[in-house]
Amino acid sequence: MQRVTKELQELGVNECEKINASQLILLGLQENEIEEWQTLSLNKQLSDARAELFVLLKGIGEKEIQEKIIVNYKALQKFRQTKQPLDEVNKKENLYQEKKSADVDIELDVEGNVTLYCDGGCTPNPGKAGSGVALYRNDKLDALWYGLYESMGTNNTAELGALYQSLLLAQKESQNGNKVQIKCDSMYSINCIQKWAISWEKKGWTKKGGEIKNLEIIKKAYALYNTIKKDVDLSHIKAHAGFEGNELADRMTMYAVEEKSEDFIQYSQPINIEEILSMKAE
């Protein structure tokens, strides 16, 4: 893993140039964050592969060239890992052409399968609320996220917020060609977007017995889920049952409350799992 420092930022982007779209994705940032990319990415944890690609893409403005560099780099990584013959590496160029002709996006991530653990918490309920997500790549912790602080929220709003942010992260990962799982400990949140919203939508977003609580975030999460559900596996996980990812997401919810972070941002401190697990739990 590499920590994003000012030195690494300068290696990847000249002072007189703008960061390109592929570099932005490698840093886990959105297009609307491009103006603040230096501040937002500072101290983030990147895999060695992502850090190398970030530097290799320096000054490359054309999207097609960016994609070609990424494909070639992935071929090199595969060659390093398997020591395959060079003719296998050359096949990657043919694969690149096939993908271009089929209009398939070139994946940026070189790390493989992704599992997202999401959690939301509120103390008391209703009360101060926050959300957290732990992202694992190939079964190894890769990043932590926290935020969505509400001074008067509920467990349900916090859980829905965490699930929605996980869906946003899952969308990006699936677009990069990765298999994604989301592990959520809130059956309420899962049922909202997998079951109940189907009926609510058909009835004009109404239900018998009164209003649908948390409707705005449910609509957003439901719409996003429907666009990616073929590529993302969403399932329930029991809370506080010894799953490291679930416990880390829980700690991030309380960290969001302590920091009063309304924005959903990546945890920028060095990731020490033992120390994070010793933080306040919900």
Image (cartoon, rainbow, N blue to C red):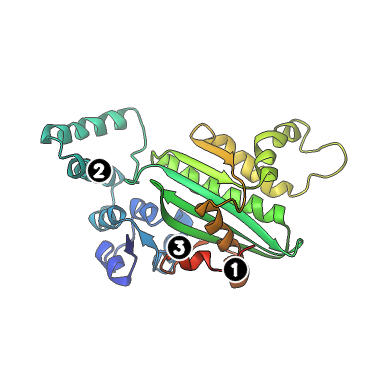
Q: Is residue 55 left or right of residue 138?
A: left
Q: Image height check: is 225 above or below 258? A: above
Question: In terms of depth relative to the viewer, which is nearer, 99 or 177?
Answer: 177
Going by the picture, which residue comes out furthest to the front?
242
Distance, label 3 to label 1, CA atoms, is: 13 Å
Q: Which quarter of the image is occupied by the N terminus? A: bottom left
Distance, label 2 to label 3, CA atoms, is: 29 Å
Q: Is residue 156 left or right of residue 209?
A: left
Circle nearer the N terminus (3, 1): 3
Tag 3 secondary structure: helix
Within-10-Å neighbours for mark 2: few <14, some 14–19, many 20+: many
Q: Which kind of residue does numbered mark 1 sit on?
A: Lys
Q: Image quarter for residue 234?
A: top right
Q: Image height check: is 263 above or below 185? A: below
Tag 1 secondary structure: loop
Q: Position of residue 241 (x, y in %)?
A: 59, 50
Q: Which kind of residue does numbered mark 3 sit on?
A: Ile
Q: Mark 2, mark 1: which one is toward the viewer? A: 1
Circle nearer the N terminus (2, 3): 2
Question: In terms of depth relative to the viewer, which is nearer, 26 or 83?
Answer: 83
Tag 2 secondary structure: helix
Residue name at image x 36 percent, y 53 percent: 26
Going by the picture, which residue comes out furthest to the right?
209
Disc number for residue 74: 2
Residue marked by disc 3:
273
Q: Position of residue 51 (x, y in %)?
A: 29, 58
Disc number for residue 202: none
Residue marked by disc 1:
280
Question: In terms of depth relative to the viewer, which is nearer, 54 or 78?
Answer: 78
Residue name at image x 53 percent, y 43 percent: 182
